[in-house]
Image (spheres, rainbow, N blue to C red):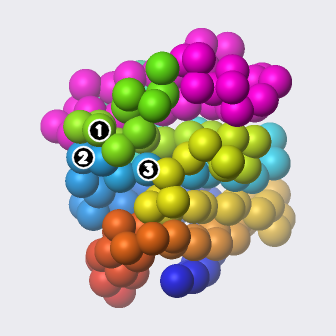
Amino acid sequence: MHWSCDSHSVEQTRELGMRLAQCVQPGDVIGLDGDLGAGKTHFVQGLVEALGVDRDAVTSPTFTLIQEYPTRIPVCHFDAYRLRDSDEFLELGVDELLGGDVVCVIEWASRVADVLPRNRLQVNIVVTSESARQFSWTATGPRGEQLLSRLMTATQ
């Protein structure tokens, strides 16, 4: 299942994250890919803010690798950019979190896709101008398809 939409500002990117927050459930896995500066962290800021934590607390986990946010549904925010391979990702203990009682959001997910659950929502962000982005959503597995279906309904 696929869907695309556009964002024309940082605020619209955060709004997409906020809308996704209305749809997520514990155990959901969301992969994020896009060039540096595409808006991955802004998207996560909207998600976390809508779940109850100040968006200013959300930073890219590029150097810490994992940020945990104690929202009403806890969010674990990973960054695979600096990892050498999937084994290094697994060494972080992510297998205990993926599909657990948290929502997992993985920036640079394509770098570790071989160890991510089949049931997930993949979001690819493409920079189309200085302020505009195109979001392409791909759901894999029944759980990912349910999540994307809920999101599409929430954005109508």
Q: Earlier in the sequence, mark 1 or mark 3?
A: 3
Residue sitting at the far top: 64
Per the image, the residue denoted by label 3 is 29
Q: Earlier in the sequence, mark 1 or mark 2?
A: 2
- Would you place residue 72 above or below residue 136 in this image? above
Whole-number angstrom distance, CA of label 1 to CA of label 3: 10 Å
Whole-number angstrom distance, CA of label 1 to CA of label 2: 7 Å
Q: Which residue lies at the image location 75% right of the left edge and 24% below the top edge?
A: 83
Residue 66 part of the magenta-drawn span: yes
How would you rate the neighbour count of disc 1 (Cα within 10 Å): few for under 14, some for 14-19, many for 20 or more? some
Q: Which residue lies at the image location 79% right of the left edge and 61% below the top edge?
A: 127
Q: Which residues are magenta?
A: 63-92
Q: Is residue 139 left or right of residue 71?
A: right
Q: Which residue lies at the image location 30% right of the left edge and 47% below the top edge?
A: 27
Q: Is residue 52 left or right of residue 12?
A: left
In contact (CB < 8 Å): disc 1 and disc 2: yes
Q: Nearer the viewer, mark 1 or mark 3?
A: 1
**Residue type marked 3:** Val
Q: Nearer the viewer, mark 1 or mark 2?
A: 1
